[in-house]
Structures are given as structure tokens and as C-alpha cells.
Image: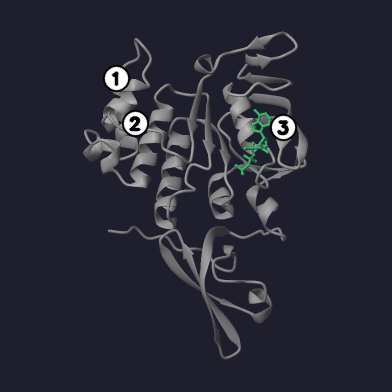
């Protein structure tokens, strides 16, 4: 369990904002901090990482106190077991992929863990290349692997995929989910992308006016109606066509294109580019091995 209580007066463009974030996160959860630009999401991550000092607060991670301002405990960033991935890849340009990962190893740490990480994020072929030779998505896979070298207790992801195109983002989301599960991480994501949040998060915390205003499952937070669907997918509308009395909405789900028949009332507020949830409960899905 991770208990967080952080208070800081932030200097925003339109005056001071009093940020008070109280959060309990279960071990193994992937949660998202969501809210308008400037509400203090990045500041919260930086305080958890020990990169920004709160006015007062506590951070207790699996019974270890990282921060307790009352008792003057404030572990340095290097002593907090965190992995941090930002939008910028921040790799060392003069080192190969492998060397970038090895550089993050602590003394006495086994180099075998690097091989495992390289395999998990599928970088075997690229491990001896320098970052300049890699695409944005490949570089971010290196940054993700590097954040895991020291086996963090909390993985902090600050809009890590915002600079990537939709296809690359979807692929990287799969890698994030894979490492989150395989390494049993507790992960805090900051993202503005609702599709991404629904795909990745167990819980979403909506920050408004310096406080957590609402918390819930992604579907509770982002859809107005509760659904008892058998399965749901999140996608993006790529076209809406009228056909006789119904509409055909084409939705991109991951890399698949799905056509959905909808009534006029369902498409009234839909526009191309909208994120949508596609749910089904009327039939049992079929499963078939793809050869
Ligand atoms: N060290 C600091 N002391 C005081 N105020 C700060 C400090 N660092 C950042 N701020 C201010 O805190 C506010 C919140 O910034 P922050 O980057 O945390 O917001 P955010 O929710 O992550 O925004 P975005 O979604 O645009 O990234 C900003 O107005 C910023 O100027």
C-alpha cells in the first residue's frame, strides 16, 4: 500500500493554487491522475519522486517512510525506489541502448536483468545502436526499460506517449501494461488521452482546484452511463456515414477498424476524432486461434 498526502502552494499564472493531494494506492495498481493543464499533476509526481519539496506531507511506500515532514524524514531521490518516464526520452546520445540501461544499474547489481528487460521491450536487435538511430517509439521503449532497471516500487509516467503517433502509442501502451503486470509494479500515470487512460488504468483520480475531486474506474469517470457489457473496447471515430435510416460509425480500435451500426440519437454528439467506448452484451464473443 502506498499512502500519499502532499500539500504545496503552487505559483500558477493566475495566482497561487493550494495543492492538497491525498491518495491511497494498492500495490500492483495502475492509477491515473487526470485534470486540466496546470492543476498540479506533474508537481505531484515530482514530490513523490523527491524532486520537489512539499510544504508538508507524507509518502509511505509499503511501510517505508520516504517523506514525513513532521518528523523531518525526506529521502533523497536516489534512495526512493522510483522509475520515471517523461514525454522527452532523455537518453544519453553517446551511449548505445544497452549502455543506457547498464548506466542505470547500481553497483553490485546483476547485469542479467538488462538482458531480460531488453527482451521484454523487444530491443534485442537495437541494443547496440545509439538513440539517434531509433524512432520515437523505440527510444521511449528504451526509456521505459531504463526506468525499470532498479526494480522500482513506484513507476511514474508523465505523459510518456504524448509525442508519439496513434499507432506507436497503442503499441507502447501494450508494453506499459506488459511491464506493469510482469514486474508487479505500482504505477502512477499522468495522461490527457482518455482512450489511453481507459485502456491502462485501474482507477482514475480527477484533480480540480488543487484537490482530488472524484475517483473511480475509468468508465465511471469518462462515460455518463454505467454499462453491464460483456466486453468493452476503446477506440477513435474515423468516419460517420448515413445509410438509409441508420448510421455506420467506423471506429479504429488499436490497429483494427470496426464498423458499428448506430441510431441517429447515438451519433448526434459524435465527431470524427472522438474517443468512444464500444461495448457489447447481446451475444457471446467467439474465440478462435489465429494461425
Ligand atoms: N517549484 C514550484 N513552486 C511553485 N509553483 C510551481 C513549482 N513548479 C511548478 N509550479 C506551478 O504549478 C502549477 C502546476 O504545474 P504542473 O506542471 O504540476 O501542472 P500539470 O497539471 O502537470 O500541467 P500539464 O497538464 O500542463 O502538464 C503551474 O502553474 C506551475 O507554474
Q: Position of residue 108 (x, y in %)?
A: 34, 10
Residue 282, placed above or below residue 51: below
Q: Residue at x 40, y 56 (%)?
A: 167
Question: CA gap, disc 1 to disc 2?
Answer: 10 Å
Mark 3 Cβ and ligand 1 under 8 Å apart: yes
Question: CA gap, disc 3 to disc 1?
Answer: 41 Å
Q: Position of residue 149 (x, y in %)?
A: 39, 25
Q: How many marks?
A: 3
Residue 282, placed above or below residue 158: below
Circles 3 and 1, Cβ within 8 Å, touching? The answer is: no
Sooner in the amino-acid sequence: mark 2 or mark 3: 3
* Residue 117 tag number: 2
Residue depth check, mark 3 versus mark 1: number of the one nearer the observer: 3
Mark 1 Cβ and ligand 1 under 8 Å apart: no
Estimate how packed mark 3 is, as few (under 14), some (14 to 19) or many (20 or more) residues with alpha carbons within 10 Å. some
Q: Residue at x 27, y 29 (%)?
A: 94
Given residues 89 and 247, the one toward you in this image is 89
Sooner in the amino-acid sequence: mark 3 or mark 1: 3
Question: Which secondary structure lies at badge 2?
Answer: helix
Which residue lies under the disc numbered 1? 111
Q: Residue at x 45, y 48 (%)?
A: 163
Amino acid at each position: 500500500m502506498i499512502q500519499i498526502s502532499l500539500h504545496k502552494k503552487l505559483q500558477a499564472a493566475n495566482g497561487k493554487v493550494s495543492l492538497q493531494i491525498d491518495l491511497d494506492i494498492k500495490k500492483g495498481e495502475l492509477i491515473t491522475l487526470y485534470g486540466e493543464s496546470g492543476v498540479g499533476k506533474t508537481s505531484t509526481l515530482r514530490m513523490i519522486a523527491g524532486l520537489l519539496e512539499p510544504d508538508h506531507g507524507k509518502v509511505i511506500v509499503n511501510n517505508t517512510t520516504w517523506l514525513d515532514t513532521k518528523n523531518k524524514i525526506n529521502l533523497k531521490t536516489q534512495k526512493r525506489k522510483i522509475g520515471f518516464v517523461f514525454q522527452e526520452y532523455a537518453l544519453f546520445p553517446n551511449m548505445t541502448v544497452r549502455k543506457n540501461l547498464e548506466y542505470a544499474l547500481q553497483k553490485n547489481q546483476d547485469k542479467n536483468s538488462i538482458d531480460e528487460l531488453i527482451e521484454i521491450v523487444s530491443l534485442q536487435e537495437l541494443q547496440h545502436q545509439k538513440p539517434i538511430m531509433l524512432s520515437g517509439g523505440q527510444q521511449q521503449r528504451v526509456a521505459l526499460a531504463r526506468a525499470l532497471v532498479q526494480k522500482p516500487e513506484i513507476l511514474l509516467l508523465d505523459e510518456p506517449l504524448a509525442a508519439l503517433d496513434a499507432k506507436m502509442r497503442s503499441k507502447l501502451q501494450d508494453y506499459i501494461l506488459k511491464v506493469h503486470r510482469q514486474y508487479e509494479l505500482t504505477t502512477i500515470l499522468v495522461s490527457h488521452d482518455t482512450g489511453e487512460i481507459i485502456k491502462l488504468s485501474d482507477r482514475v483520480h480527477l484533480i480540480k482546484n488543487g484537490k482530488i475531486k472524484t475517483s473511480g474506474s475509468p468508465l465511471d469517470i469518462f462515460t455518463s452511463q454505467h454499462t453491464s457489457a460483456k466486453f468493452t473496447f476503446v477506440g477513435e471515430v474515423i468516419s460517420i456515414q448515413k445509410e438509409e435510416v441508420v448510421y455506420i460509425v467506423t471506429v479504429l480500435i488499436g490497429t483494427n477498424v470496426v464498423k458499428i451500426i448506430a441510431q441517429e440519437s447515438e451519433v448526434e454528439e459524435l465527431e470524427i476524432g472522438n474517443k468512444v467506448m464500444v461495448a457489447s452484451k447481446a451475444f457471446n464473443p467467439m474465440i478462435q486461434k489465429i494461425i
